[in-house]
Image (spheres, helix red, strand yellow):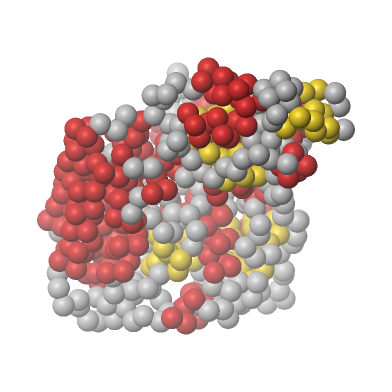
Amino acid sequence: MIAYSPARSGELAVSYDGRWIHSRYDPRTEARRFVERETPASGGYRAAVILGDGLGYLVDAVRERLPSVPVIWLNYHRDLFDHRVANADAMWSGHGPPDRFLDQSLLDDESSALLVLAWEPAARAFPDVAERCLAALRTVLDRRTAVLATEGFFGRRWLRNSIRTALALCARGAAERHPAMRTAISADSVVIAAAGPSLTRSLSDLASLPAGMPIWALPSAVSVLINAGIRPDLVVATDGGAYAIEHLKPLRGLGVPVAAPLSAALDRPEDGYPIVLLNQGSWFERDLVSLLPTTAIELPPHGTVAGSAWYLASAIGVRAVSFVGLDLCTADLHAHPPGHRFERILRPLARRTNPLYTTLFRRSVVDSEVIPGHSAERAWMSRSMRVYAKWFAEADPPTPAVRVHPSPVAIAMPTGELPRATDPRRPDAESATVPWSSVVPSLIGVPHGRRSPATPAGLLQPAVDRWTRALDNLPTALRRPARERSRGESLACDIARTIETAHYLNVLRHAQSADAEALADACRATLAQCVGRLSADGSAGVHP
């Protein structure tokens, strides 16, 4: 039971089942001393997250100690929240998932220099809510850390891929802009093929689909489908790594459309196969897409290509999706079905002292956990697969979907079956599939026989000039709180975080003017090197 009473100092104090959440003598001084003990004044914090705090005395103490730092407060009980004595910049009182609240309230830059204060008396009074909030904060920070690690590893490659593909699309010639491509498509349902081990069990069902039901493939499933004589109607690709090109090579000469953002690693984009351009909202995509003679489908960014394909289906009006091969785990040593593209790479590398099964064991089992309760064969789940599964388990479905031949990994998606037809589609027969041009009213990036009036490099130069000018704002932006930056300052920080991630994070924590100028110079040099090399190279679509 919650009880309120005045403290000796005259401030309001509160207890729960006889346990005091604040000092019964002077709660405000207690909070101030706690913050001074836990928080060095020169900590370089970008934001503060307070877990617990009964009535908000901690909020006031943090504001007094760090006046320029935004405060995010998770309160453990609605009644305490209603009796609060202070307001934070963002507050949660039990309504909605705490991780969603933190994702919306905490900016990316703030999470890299974050002060976290947990009020232990509140945690003892409400242990279940406290654990839930702490787990949510860990999840959000783990996710942000993973994003930063990915950005640090792939950032420059994303930029190179984007410029390379943009140059290839410009060289093809202008495509007509068709706003109708955002409207509903003629197919009510599609099948999305992922490359989990269970895909093998679905191959006969895929070959027996009704003739009007399109198959979308994720890149790692392409070789398995092609080897089974099944030609996909569309491939959705978002991975920016050079190894991702290997998955797309079996499509050469088939004319299968590929839906991809500019940042994806595409196999020879200058070859003329249809490209359905996606825009996931990054700074380089926004600027480059606006200059291209094409249009793009806008999708939210996502950590897994299966999620992006699901969002794409929703964006163009698909009303039902069937996933096959969406396992999110390995089956024994196998992360993929037989015929996977990487097999042709791994098998020749096998040696007596390093056999193939040892390689598979390292890739599939090491650092993974066994999924309990699955007796047919051992199913392993890596940390990255666990993150993906958590998203599928908690996501609001963009459009209704079912999972065929589900794995032991439980996600918020019902089990379903693929429809069968008395006159099925003929495997690997063009006439048996629904061409993508009949599904979407326009094909993006298909040559129309006319050239752009300017050279491809000249067409993209305004974007490069804008990025270079934006970097002049970087020193000022790094000294300013993230919530107070102008659009130009935010763009400068986005550029630096993408192409000089480690340097940027270091300067962000210790924003000295000389370091910020050096960071801006490094970013300009990277942009000049990337753009200059690709513009001078006659092979715009060839990856190193």
- Farthest left residue? 536
- Quadrant housing residue 135: top right
Could you say where residue 258 lies in the image, as x and y percent from the top left? 43, 64
Tell me: residue 345, above or below residue 397: above
Q: Nearer the viewer, residue 13 or 292?
A: 13
Q: Nearer the viewer, residue 92 or 503?
A: 92
Tell me: residue 53, above or below residue 337: above
Q: Residue at x 48, y 54 (%)?
A: 301
- Quadrant housing residue 268: bottom left
Q: Nearer the viewer, residue 531 or 101?
A: 101
Q: Total of numbered circles in the picture?
A: 0
Left or right relative to 425: residue 409: right
Q: Residue at x 60, y 43 (%)?
A: 87
Q: Residue at x 81, y 22 (%)?
A: 19
Left or right relative to 31: residue 535: left
Q: Residue at x 47, y 82 (%)?
A: 180
Q: Using the rendered image of the protein, determine whether residue 518 is visible from the camera's viewpoint.
A: yes
Tell me: residue 263, above or below residue 177: above
- Quadrant housing residue 12: top right
Left or right relative to 132: residue 287: left
Could you say where residue 2 lies in the image, as x and y percent from the top left? 83, 34
Image quadrant occupied by the N terminus: top right
Could you say where residue 330 lies in the image, as x and y percent from the top left? 62, 38
Q: Using the rendered image of the protein, determine whether residue 131 is visible from the camera's viewpoint.
A: no
Could you say where residue 475 lies in the image, as x and y percent from the top left? 24, 41
